[in-house]
Amino acid sequence: MNKNKKIFICCTEQSGENIVFNICKKLTKYNYQIDGVCGKSSEKYFTNKYYDISLFKSLGLVEILFSIPNYIRIINELSNKILANNYDLVICVDSPDFNYQLAKKIKNNNFKKKIIQIVAPTVWAWRSGRAKKFSRVFNEIFTLFKFERKFFENQGLKSTFIGHPISIINEGLYNNKEKNLIAFLPGSRDNEINKLFPYLEYVYEYLLSNNIKDYQIFIPTLPHLIDKLTNLTKNWKIKTIISDNNENNEKLYKDVFISVTCSGTASLEIAKRMIPQIVFYKLNFLTYLIFSFLVNVRFANILNILSNKMIIKEVVNRNLNKKNLLEAFDILLNDQNFRDNQILEIQKFLPEIQSKTNPYDICEKRITEIISTTT
């Protein structure tokens, strides 16, 4: 029955790619044809892959402005594919601005099948009007956080809470036994590495100059960044492990003492593993300036937002410099009370973003229900 059912998936972010991979793995048993946009790990589940996520490199408002002509062209091509193939379901994952434009385009061109969005735009932080706009083009939205549902349901958009993907990560054990790794997480995009890696070099130099010999450096990464990171660290005098093997990484995480983490999903994953951390990030100056007028929240990290205090130290944007980063790192490395308190607070708020059920089981159930009703 399902052999003729076709699903189009659009994913342009690495964090979304992890979601797509796990959903596709669940859907293999149904013999759906899956086409669209994804990354390297998910492509084995796709019959037709039209674009790779590596083409979508924009980060902030300013970078996106320069990419608009290219994105318009891609949206036009993808909408033509969707309309020509009359897919039974369109699933948009993350990248809310790009996916909204794609959904709007096909809706305006009389696409009658259902369109769902997985990962809600942060309407609670800025641009709250997006909830109403989304309700006009999407049939349903899957949210990672329970509190997000009300923003969309108030606009008449059906919402399904699936929980954050960290729900499936085995919770780490926090203790003060001898752990010999310091994790550096510089981001999942090439331009993030370019922008943020110099700050990790400051931390490396701190370790070197203070003759801290008890630790090795661990950099978990993705296949397309291995060569770049290997080259950047080739002259380092502290042993550095760079790994893109998820199974191997999980073993290594058990020996991570502390982490210097790029803000975003990676920070939540580190928190779930009960690893004390500091978060760092820097937006383009003009992007930051625009955001400063629009954003309604004080923090970048969702756990800090939920608690309304800085559980996880953020050294971001105009505050990110060598002095501030090394001061924060010094406290993280040497202050046990700081580490203990962070983990204690994290444990209070993690339940608010997790689902007791595997998020991908919820996705599988709801997607199959939706697609079974298409004719």
Image (spheres, grey):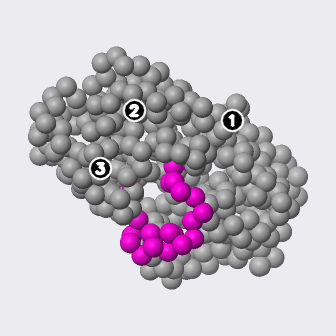
Task: Please name the amino acid that badge 1 sits on.
Answer: Ser
Crowd around label 1: few <14 · some 14–19 · many ≥20 (10 Å): many
Residue 336 image position (x, y, % from top left): 35, 26
Secondary element at tag 2: helix
Secondary element at tag 1: loop
Judge whether 282 appears above or below 287 on screen.
above
Residue 210 image position (x, y, % from top left): 13, 36
Q: Is residue 10 left or right of residue 313?
A: right
Residue at mark 3: 325
Point out the residue furthest to the bottom here.
Answer: 69
Q: Which residues are magenta?
A: 281-302
Viewer can see residue 174: yes
Crowd around label 2: few <14 · some 14–19 · many ≥20 (10 Å): some
Task: Please name the amino acid that badge 3 sits on.
Answer: Leu
Residue at mark 1: 355
Asked if the residue under mark 2 is in contact with the one under mark 1, i.e. CB atoms within 8 Å, the reply is no
Does residue 299 show up magenta in the picture? Answer: yes
Could you tell me which quadrant the C terminus lies in? bottom right
Does residue 97 show up magenta in the picture? Answer: no
Query: Which residue is located at x 37 percent, y 52 percent?
Result: 315
Judge whether 99 appears above or below 370 on screen.
below
Task: Please name the amino acid that badge 2 sits on.
Answer: Phe
Residue at mark 2: 338
Of tags 1 and 2, the one toward the viewer is 2
Dot 1 or dot 2: first in sequence order is 2
Judge whether 218 appears above or below 126 on screen.
above
| Residue 134: quadrant of the picture | bottom right
